[in-house]
Image (spheres, helix red, strand yellow):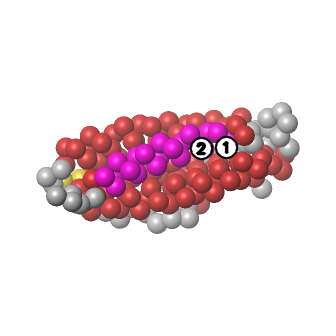
């Protein structure tokens, strides 16, 4: 059970706990995502190296900011956000990114799968937040829009030309 020091006005303790649990999962996912994207940035090779290498850095920076935004929302709800690697690994419900030094298409295909998981679970959290708190819902909707755009960038690189 999540301990709360307080919660935001108009939101009950039980609802705040439910939101905090969902947001903590999102915090783990976003921390994992920005580290995964940076890992791919360092390890991508091949003919499209520079395009992919440079495409990933803005994604890393924005996702880091999303993690901060989610952590601060957890704190606003009266809980303590957890950003430690051990807790992330112990509590995550997904596998570690396995691709090391590899070509652009291999990394992009793996990143596409990572985005599938992050976006799908963000959408579940949006549904919960929609029932409980429009502020948290708004945060997650805005993040999801950009995450979906980043996934589109990745998918555009994976798509074969029709010419």
Whether residue 5 appears in this view of the structure is no
Left or right placement of residue 138 versus residue 13 in this view: left
Find disc 2 in the rendering and name its residue.
Answer: 141
Q: Percent position (x, y) of residue 66?
A: 53, 39
Q: Percent position (x, y) of residue 1?
A: 77, 56
Q: CA distance from mark 2 to mark 1?
A: 6 Å
Disc 1, SS: helix
Other residues around mark 2 within 10 Å, as few (<14) / some (14–19) / many (≥20): some
Q: Percent position (x, y) of residue 68?
A: 55, 37
Left or right placement of residue 118 versus residue 60 in this view: right
Q: Do the residues bearing badges 2 and 1 touch, measured as CB atoms within 8 Å? A: yes
Q: Residue at x 84, y 45 (%)?
A: 13
Q: Residue at x 81, y 49 (%)?
A: 15
Find disc 1 in the rendering and name its residue.
Answer: 137
Whether residue 47 appears in this view of the structure is yes
Front position in the image: 79 or 26: 26
Per the rendered image, the range of residues in magenta is 136-156
């Amino acid at each position: 059970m999540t301990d709360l020091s307080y919660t935001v006005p108009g939101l009950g303790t039980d609802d705040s706990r439910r939101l905090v649990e969902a947001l903590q999962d999102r915090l783990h996912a976003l921390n994992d995502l920005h580290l995964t994207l940076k890992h791919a940035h360092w390890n991508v090779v091949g003919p499209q190296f520079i395009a992919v290498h440079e495409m990933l850095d803005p994604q890393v920076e924005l996702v880091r900011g999303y993690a901060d935004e989610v952590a601060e929302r957890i704190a606003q709800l009266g809980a303590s956000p957890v950003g430690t690697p051990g807790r992330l690994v112990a509590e995550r419900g997904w596998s570690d990114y396995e691709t090391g030094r590899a070509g652009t298409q291999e990394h992009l295909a793996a990143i596409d799968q990572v985005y599938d998981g992050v976006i799908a679970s963000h959408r579940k959290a949006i549904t919960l937040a929609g029932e409980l708190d429009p502020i948290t819902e708004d945060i997650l909707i805005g993040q999801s829009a950009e995450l979906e755009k980043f996934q589109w960038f990745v998918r555009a690189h994976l798509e074969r030309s029709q010419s």
